[in-house]
Amino acid sequence: RTGVTRPVPRPPKPDAMEDDTSSPSAAGCGRRVEEDERIPKRRRQIDAGGPIEDDETAREKMSDAIVRNVDATPASGRTGFDPDNATERKILYRNENFITPMGYFSRNGDLPMMRWLYVRGADTRDTEVEFWFPMYAAAYRGHLEACKWLFAHGAAEDVRRRTGFNDQSPLRITMVGGMRGGFLHQAVGKWLILNGALCTDDGSGALSQEKVRSDFFIPKEISMYLDWAKGLQQARAAFLTFMVGTLCRRNHNSSAYCTRLRSACHARSLEGKPGLLELICDYAGIVRGREAYIIRQVTEWLSERQRQQWLRQSAQTLIGELNSTLGASKREK
């Protein structure tokens, strides 16, 4: 028809064209390919969970690591890690155990370096390493934030993992660290317990009696962790009492009073606000769910463990007194 103009067809956008970078006219496509190559790296940096070490500084740290080659002797000196190999195994200097870069920097608590290695494909578990796997190495030095980062990036099962030749766990090594007076080791030990270090491998949250007996062998540590678990239980009970309310009386059994009691309950005001009660519990440090179940079991098992140790010590003391009495009577005769 006259007076009607048809739209002129536009050329296709570079994003809709095929990725043919061999043609010099495909400049837009080449830019798209470069952006696609940067996207996976950018996503890995986001997944790393924090700032990553500068590349030049990271390479210097890798080269300056106090490790040696597998076939070298301690007298030959340290060789460091290869900056281009994030998964190689070497021997910890003046030690006979294998360690990887992830385990080495977990032992130092160097989170930016751990993220730098993670971006470059390092394993957070190091399943082929029998002793210095990352979770154990971080717990050995009392690095709580490093343990949390490893837990969130694929090493959650390593809180229950044990070393190959001496059957030590991350929790057990914090007991030894706690004896040296390190409150950092105690913080790591408490975090490990709440995250299932003493639980069975079936995911039920039930404690393993074998693990409790193996890891809790120091009377001082048993007493300290028992007081901690009892404190968490008391705080939880006080919080629940506050949320439910304390207006109930024995002589009020009428339905009208029960209705008024439910309306005055603190927990009633949180209805229709999902997640708010959990946020309050986390802010106040109140254990809930699986953690509360673990703490209740820890309290029961450690109380029994402490009672057994007390009976054993009492029996040893009684036997010593009897032996001294018998020896004195024999000397008199």
Image (cartoon, rainbow, N blue to C red):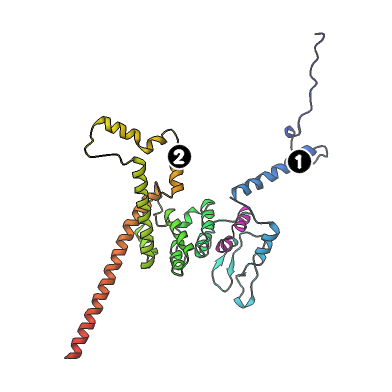
Q: Nearer the viewer, mark 2 or mark 1?
A: 2
Residue depicted at 21% across the width and 37% down the height: 251
Quadrant location of the C terminus in the rendered image:
bottom left
Please identify the residue farthest to the top as the structure is shown: 2
Residue density around tag 1, few if under 14, some if 14–19, many if 20 or more, within 10 Å: some
Which quadrant of the structure image shows residue 123? Answer: bottom right
Question: Whole-Å distance between the Cαs marked 2 and 1?
Answer: 46 Å
Residue 75 on the magenta span:
no
Q: In the picture provided, is 242 more to the left or to the right than 37?
A: left
Residue found 54% across the figure and 54% down from its top: 149
Q: Amino acid at mark 2?
A: Leu
Looking at the rendered structure, the secondary structure element under dot 1 is helix
Crowding near pointer 2: few (<14 within 10 Å), some, many (20+)? Answer: few
Residue 276: which numbered mark, if any? Answer: 2
| Residue found farthest to the left | 333
User: Where does residue 155 sit, x and y in percent of width and height?
Assistant: 51, 54
Q: Which residues are magenta?
A: 102-119
Q: Does 117 lie within the magenta span? A: yes
Q: Amino acid at mark 1?
A: Arg
Above or below, 113 against 180 in this view is above
